[in-house]
Amino acid sequence: MKTLKYLFTAALLASFFISDTFGEVSIAMAGVIGFPYADPNAMDHYASENFSSFEGDDVYTGDGDHFLNFGGPGISFKNEGNASRSFVMNITNNDKISHTATLTPGYDWVPGQTDPIKKYAADGAMLLDGASVLLSGSGSPKTIREFLSFLSKNPSNLAGIRVSSNNNTSQIEQTIIVRELSPFKDLESRTIILGNYTHENNQREKMVTVPTPGVILGPETELILPIMPQSVCTITFFIGGVLSTSGALKHKRAAAVAQLPAAQVAIPSVRVPFKFPVKKATGTYMPTLATQKN
């Protein structure tokens, strides 16, 4: 138990004893602080939720944070590799020279946008030369468009990234640029040198997996990677914690519903505007919903 919890719990227990002599004193005190004074278990829960420890045994891992989604129970920042959430992006370069592709665009990108300079990752053609497709992409398990649209609305922690090539060993010697974006000033970019994570005894000479601490995929970040000529580059994104405002709203509503009477959270009834009877040659009738017109 935390030190402060003990003190707080002891004070409340003492107030229960004093209440035998002073009547409503302890009840009034509990009412002032909004504490469920009659239930010892509630006391412990209240202290846990509302007081921090001075002993330093509270460590934030993201577990229980309703604004975060780790893909399953028992997963947090300390073991987000267990989230088992990955997205695979294949970029094909049919040209005789390398092309630098923007794997994840920033806030100035809109779904479906193409750019011959930035070469945004996309499903299908990314770069054309007349009728020839020089650069193209595909995604799995969903489309690249869905993946990038998700990131634009739900910033996600990149736990790691894997880069491989079907026939070009120099692909895993390239450098990923992590470009931070701001409309107010230019920010410094980070580099991830893939070659630093290869080993001369590595049997997989066309594949490398690297950790990416502190890289958040979202509207404020671009990931840029050169794609080697006449090859297919496969990039696997390992996603950890995801910032989810909709998930937080679900939790908050559920917490509110659990405390409110059912009548206060019932679905409101749909009111149909009253229509006066309509006269027809065969008589008078009341119009149905299908025949009502505004």
Image (spheres, rainbow, N blue to C red):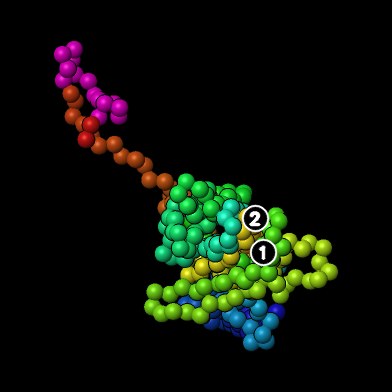
Q: Secondary structure at mark 1?
A: helix
Residue 92, position as x, y percentages in the image: 60, 53
Would residue 165 be seen by someone viewing this image from the given angle? yes
CB atoms at circles 2 and 1 under 8 Å apart?
yes
Taking the spot 56% from the left edge, 72% from the top edge, the residue there is 178
Query: Which label sits on residue 156?
Result: none
Magenta range: 279-292
Asked if the stretch drawn in magenta spans residue 283, the answer is: yes
Taking the spot 58% from the left edge, 65% from the top edge, the residue there is 226
> For the view shown, which residue lies furthest in the front direction?
96
Residue at which label 2 appears: 231
- Mark 1: give few (<14), some (14-19) or many (20+) Cα within 10 Å: many
Query: Which label sits on residue 171?
Result: 1
Would residue 44 be seen by someone viewing this image from the given angle? no
| Residue 54, quarter of the rendered image | bottom right
- How far apart are the two marked residues, 2 and 1, measured between alpha carbons? 9 Å
Kind of residue at disc 2: Ser
